[in-house]
Each structure stands twice: as C-alpha cells, then as structure tokens.
Amino acid sequence: MTKKQWQHGSYYGYNKKGCKCDPCVEAGREYAETWRQRHLESRVLIHGRLVSTTLKIHGTCNGYTNFGCRCISCTAANTEAVLRNRRKKNDSKAAAGAQ
C-alpha cells in the first residue's frame, strides 16, 4: 500500500497535512471562500428573511455566521451568543478594575 502523494498549493495539503506554506494557505483560503459563496447563494427569501437551504440544524450561531441564515431561530441564537460574550467581556473588565 502506497502513501497518497500530495502537492503544495492544494487544499489537501493545507487541511489534511497541516501545511502552512503560502501556496497551501492560499488554497485553503480559496476553498473556504468558494464554500461560503456556495452556501450564501443557496439562501432563499422566506417572510422577508434570507434562510439557508443547506443548513441541517437551525437555531445555531454556526447557521447565522457561516451559512448566513437569518431565520428567526438562527438570529436569536446569534443574538444570545453576542449578549453572552458582551456580558463576559464586561464582567472581566469589572473584575480587573476591582483589583
């Protein structure tokens, strides 16, 4: 059994082999952009909101951020996460100021 040969400048090299040379990083960037565009283009307008048709589970920050889904449940999940992170940030500032 032979090992799979791979080339620099490929998504395989970046993702599976962990190569961080400039050509592999660029290939990873191009793949991510193509993936994102494909998912953003698959959204449909439902009741005035762009809803992802490729997202399997709605009501997540992942759906809102990575798939661009603006359904009510994905928007609510993202809002909750933003508020939670803001509270964390404010709590840590308050704790640092109290010392």
Image (cartoon, helix red, strand yellow):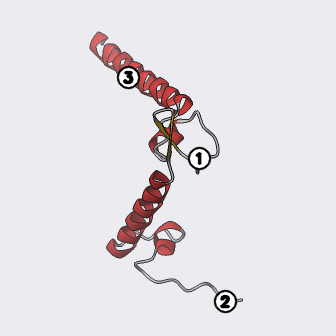
- Residue farthest top in this picture: 98
Residue at screen point 47% across, 72% down: 11
> The N terminus is located in which quarter?
bottom right
> Left or right of 91: which side holds 49?
right
Read off the residue under disc 3: 86
Label located before the other in sequence (1 or 3): 1
Mark-to-mark CA distance, 1 and 2: 37 Å
> What residue would you read off at disc 2?
2
Nearest-to-viewer mark from 1 and 2: 1
Query: Compared to 10, does 51 lie above or below?
Result: above
User: Quick one: label 1 or label 2, which is nearer the N terminus?
Assistant: 2
Compare residues 32 and 92 and report the one nearer the observer.
32
The answer to which of 30 and 38 lies nearer the viewer is 38
Mark 3 lies on a secondary structure that is helix
Percent from the top left, x then y, of residue 29? 38, 64
Relative to 70, 30 lies left or right = left
Residue beneath label 1, please?
55
Callout 2, which amino acid?
Answer: Thr
**Residue at x-position 43% and y-position 60%:** 32
Q: Residues within 10 Å of mark 1 (few under 14, many from 20)?
A: some
Residue 80: x and y in percent read 48, 24
Q: Which mark is residue 81?
A: none
Nearer the camera: disc 1 or disc 3: 1
Mark nearest the camera among 2 and 3 is 3
* Disc 2 element: loop
Distance between the Cα atoms at labels 1 and 3? 27 Å
